[in-house]
């Protein structure tokens, strides 16, 4: 794993204030934990060595200096909502169709000083730095990114009011970044995620109203009539779908995301917590009541995955138990769907994020076995490749506990259809705070 230090002074812009020695210790911590995790993921996914080195350098030299203090169990700071235990890093493997080697992705939430914690200024600095960086791919500070950074900029608040807002919302995650590490570095893609809950808490709107307002702003400002017409039609369909559900569903929008790229090539993604748990109910929400079309084969495969990664068959007894026990399940623990609006499409597309933690799953081992069984059953398994030993990967990548001991390494198993082929993604957290507890 590369261990080079950034020569770009801009990387210090977002670092929290502390002594130089402590900053060096924190930086080394992120490199030796998350940096090594990423390196192992790239090796598992059989990335070419030169490509792996470029991405590892991007992470360790450009992003690690922005991560701030290392986790401490006694820390009273408000944590990230990116993962269950508050770790500000999440990893992902994307398995596409019959492609034997997965794509590696990750999300990070850079740290900030207490004063700029809820400001988009640090996110703007990061986008500008990425657009000038050694691995740029399709990254560009577009008018959409500019506009959303302005839209989600919160008013300056006195310290007491800022603390009160953080307590009300329950986390610090105003802006998060995601990265798709394509094997062709020229296709490297960055995404920016805005959490609508802070603006909603200030204005009194629902989180969906905040997200809807942001998308409408992008369309009002666009000079591309074709893009306006295409996105407007899809937004109208999504708006009608969500407004048919109770207020609680509209207030459960989790993220609004765009690619850090030109609007014509960007996707607008709206993440909403799914109010259903039985597969039939989830399916109606995911497909916008059959507005979004999936083949019967894809539906059967998705239903099988939904069952297997939870270690169950979802018979009527299990389904009824799950539905009746939902009143005891915090809303943040339920499934999520995202809906994608993209130039050139007539209807949105969607993705299902299956929650694979307690109380729906007993252990990460169950999730891993279910995924491996699904790969075999649907003929995605390459018997000649060691890369499909998914359980072993988890044990070597994040070895601090046994997979059978608990849930938490997996956040979600996601599934969607891209260009006519199923894509399955695993979302993983290194549990850096949990290890300290």
Image (spheres, helix red, strand yellow):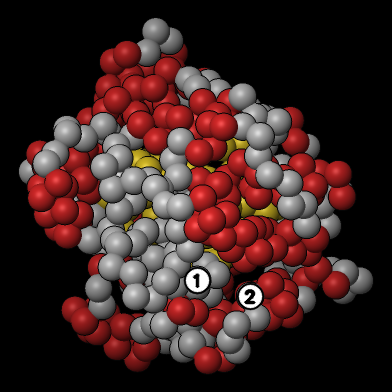
Q: Secondary structure at mark 1?
A: loop
Q: Between residue 102 and residue 108, name the one nearer to us.
A: 108
Q: Secondary structure at mark 2?
A: loop
Q: Vertical placement of 321 versus 387: above or below?
A: below
Q: Quadrant of residue 101?
A: bottom right
Which quadrant would the C terminus be assigned to in this image? bottom left
- The label on residue 166 is none
Give the image location of residue 375, x and y in percent: 70, 71
Measure the C-alpha gap from mark 1 to mark 2.
Answer: 10 Å
Q: Along the horizontal axis of the image, is 398 left or right of 1? A: left
Which quadrant would the N terminus be assigned to in this image? bottom right
Dot 1, crowdedness within 10 Å: few (<14), some or many (≥20)? many
Q: Is residue 34 visible?
A: no
Q: Residue at x 26, y 32 (%)?
A: 153
Q: Which residue is mark 2?
A: 398
- The label on residue 432 is 1
Q: Residue at x 80, y 60 (%)?
A: 43
Give the image location of residue 40, x and y in percent: 74, 64
Q: Vertical placement of 433 versus 236: above or below?
A: below
Q: Between residue 159 and residue 183, name the one nearer to us.
A: 159
Q: Along the horizontal axis of the image, is 35 left or right of 108? A: right
Q: Is residue 429 visible?
A: yes
Dot 2, crowdedness within 10 Å: few (<14), some or many (≥20)? many
Give the image location of residue 108, x and y in percent: 50, 51
Question: Pointers 1 and 2 in contact (CB under 8 A)?
Answer: no
Q: Residue at x 12, y 54 (%)?
A: 164
């Amino acid at each position: 794993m590369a261990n080079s230090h950034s020569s770009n002074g801009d990387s210090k812009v977002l670092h929290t204030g502390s002594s130089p020695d402590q900053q060096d210790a924190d930086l080394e911590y992120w490199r030796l934990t998350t940096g090594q995790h990423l390196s192992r993921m790239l090796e598992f996914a059989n990335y070419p060595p030169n490509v792996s080195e470029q991405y590892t350098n991007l992470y360790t030299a450009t992003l690690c200096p922005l991560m701030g203090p290392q986790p401490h169990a006694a820390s009273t700071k408000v944590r990230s909502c990116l993962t269950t235990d508050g770790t500000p890093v999440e990893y992902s493997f994307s398995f596409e169709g019959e492609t034997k080697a997965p794509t590696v992705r990750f999300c990070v939430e850079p740290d900030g000083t207490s004063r700029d914690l809820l400001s988009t200024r640090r996110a703007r600095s990061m986008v500008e730095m990425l657009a000038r960086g050694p691995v740029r791919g399709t990254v560009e500070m577009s008018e959409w990114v500019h506009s959303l950074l302005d839209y989600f900029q919160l008013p300056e608040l006195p310290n007491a009011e800022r603390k009160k807002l953080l307590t009300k919302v329950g986390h610090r995650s105003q802006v998060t970044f995601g990265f798709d590490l394509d094997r062709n570095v020229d296709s490297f893609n960055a995404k920016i995620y805005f959490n609508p809950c802070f603006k909603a808490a200030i204005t009194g709107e629902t989180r969906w109203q905040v997200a809807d307002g942001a998308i409408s702003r992008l369309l009002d400002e666009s000079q591309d009539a074709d893009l306006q017409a295409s996105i407007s039609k899809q937004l109208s369909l999504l708006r009608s779908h969500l407004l048919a559900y109770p207020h609680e569903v509209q207030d459960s929008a989790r993220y609004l995301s765009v690619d850090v790229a030109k609007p014509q090539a960007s996707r607008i993604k709206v993440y909403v917590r799914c109010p259903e748990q039985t597969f039939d109910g989830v399916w109606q929400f995911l497909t916008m009541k059959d507005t979004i079309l999936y083949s019967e084969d894809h539906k059967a495969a998705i239903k099988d995955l939904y069952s297997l990664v939870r270690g169950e068959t979802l018979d009527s007894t299990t389904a009824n138990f799950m539905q009746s026990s939902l009143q005891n399940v915090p809303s943040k623990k339920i499934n999520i769907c995202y809906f994608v609006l993209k130039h050139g499409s007539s209807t949105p597309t969607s993705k299902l994020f299956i929650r694979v933690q307690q109380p729906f799953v007993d252990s990460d081992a169950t999730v891993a076995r279910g995924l491996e069984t699904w790969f075999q059953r649907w003929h995605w398994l390459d018997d000649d490749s060691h890369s499909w030993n998914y359980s072993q990967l988890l044990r070597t990548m994040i070895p601090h506990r046994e997979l059978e001991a608990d849930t938490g390494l997996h956040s979600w198993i996601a599934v969607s259809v891209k260009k006519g082929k199923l894509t399955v993604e695993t979302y993983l957290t290194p549990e850096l705070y949990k290890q300290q507890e």
